[in-house]
Image (spheres, rainbow, N blue to C red):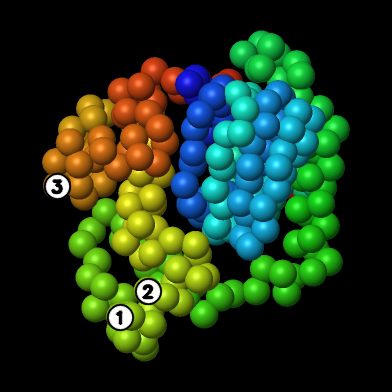
Amino acid sequence: MSIKFYMNKASGIEIISIEASNEHYKSHNHTLHYVIGFMVKGEIRLEKGTKTYTLEAQDTFVIEPDQKHAIKALKSFTLIAFSIEETFFNTYPVEEAKKIVHQMKQWPKLMDLLMNVNMERILNHIEAIYRLQNTNPATHKKRELDHVKVLICDHATKPLSLDNLAESAFLSKFHFVKKFSAEFGLTPHNFKIQRQIRMAQKQLLETKSISEVAANMGFFDQSHFTKYFKKILKLTPTDYKHACIELEVLDSKPEQA
């Protein structure tokens, strides 16, 4: 298995390249990110919400923020995924956003990687996200437990008891866990851990030691941190640091309204 992460902090876009033969990404979500995927070769099964899709070369897919999904290899595959922060769609007008993504194919570090990616289809998905947000705001209506999600995201590195979380939702612990899992695809505990790992990814790129990041993220020790990190990303923190490639700052600036 080979994974590479290409990061551009200026835009909030991360491009992930995955080559694998027998991998299974169990049910998870991406809080605060859209993911647009492009199958370069091979075959996978994508479980998204209540539906299942078989995807082959040249197929694309979109995962919305907090959308429960899982991926299982059916054949050896190569997948390119564009992970784009929600703030990107609020910062750039649609044509400027499409220009930024399209230009990435010309960046030296991405030319070979994106050579076989149909960028027109990626841009069509980006335009569709803008169109959906502008024409159908109800699609993005708040869920009943959004305030609990925000609470977990804001305090993921601190101890959060199930009792207190359930109380903030005015539900029993049993009904709270059931409802939260239904809305976000993960139990509150797993959602918190996933958030800790996402935050840790950014800190690992700041040349901090793994033990320091583990402590900052609220893990009991480095071994527990490494265990959960590898479970979610299929890489150890050390391997992740080696697999990350930081991209140059974008020349493009958001247009002024």
Report the Cα–Cα distance between label 2 and label 3: 24 Å
Where residue 237 sits in the image (x, y, percent)? 31, 29
Decide if residue 196 is in sight here: yes
Can you identify the residue that label 3 sits on? 220
Label 1 element class: helix
Please rate how many residues cluster around mark 1, counting C-alpha atoms within 10 Å: few if below 14, some from 14 to 19, many from 20.
some
- Mark 2 and mark 1 residues within 8 Å of each other at the beta carbon: yes
Q: Mark 1 points at which residue?
A: 173
User: How many callouts does the rendering have?
Assistant: 3
- Element marked by disc 2: helix
Q: How far apart are marks 1 and 3 (CA)?
A: 24 Å
State the image quarter where residue 203 is shown.
top left
Q: Within 10 angstroms of label 2, few (less than 14), some, or many (20 or more) residues? A: some
Q: Position of residue 58 (x, y in %)?
A: 79, 30
The Cα–Cα distance between marks 2 and 1, rounded to whole angstroms, is: 6 Å
Let me know if residue 6 appears in the view: no
Residue 177 badge: 2
Local crowd size for mark 3, using a 10 Å CA cut-off: few (<14), some (14–19), many (≥20): few
